[in-house]
Image (cartoon, rainbow, N blue to C red):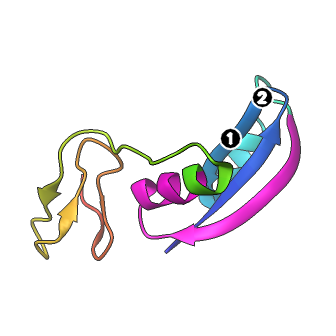
Amino acid sequence: MTKYEVWETDDGCVLFGSENREKALANPAIKFVKLLYEFEAATGEEAAAIHNLRMGFGAYTPVGEPERCPKCRTWFYPEGSGQCWRCGQIC
């Protein structure tokens, strides 16, 4: 599981994995106002879906078509995050 953060900005909000926190907060193009919430998710698609629901944006539509993970055969989105919820980063 990866920890994600959602920050309020001057222009709306931004979602990123906590492992990218230093890089995101150092971006001079974005003015971070306050941390809205944190949560854990298994994939980028799951994180985006949780974020959309919490923010009232409606259902999240993943990028590309789902395919079977070559390791465990569960579904994942290779054109999106490339993450399998069981195996981690695939592509």
Q: Is residue 3 left or right of residue 44?
A: right
Q: Is residue 27 visible?
A: no
Helix, strand or loop under label 1: strand
Q: Is residue 43 left or right of residue 9?
A: left
Residue at (56% x, 49% y) in the render: 52
**Residue that extends furthest to the top in the rendered view of this protein:** 29
* Number of numbered callouts drawn: 2
Residue at (57% x, 55% y) in the render: 53
Q: Residue at label 1?
A: 14
Q: Position of residue 8 (x, y in %)?
A: 81, 42
Q: Is residue 50 visible?
A: yes
Q: Which residues are magenta?
A: 32-51
Quadrant position of residue 3: bottom right
Give whichever of 39, 54 is nearer the camera. Answer: 54
At label 2, the amino acid type is Ile
Residue at (71% x, 65% y) in the render: 38
Q: Residue at label 2?
A: 30
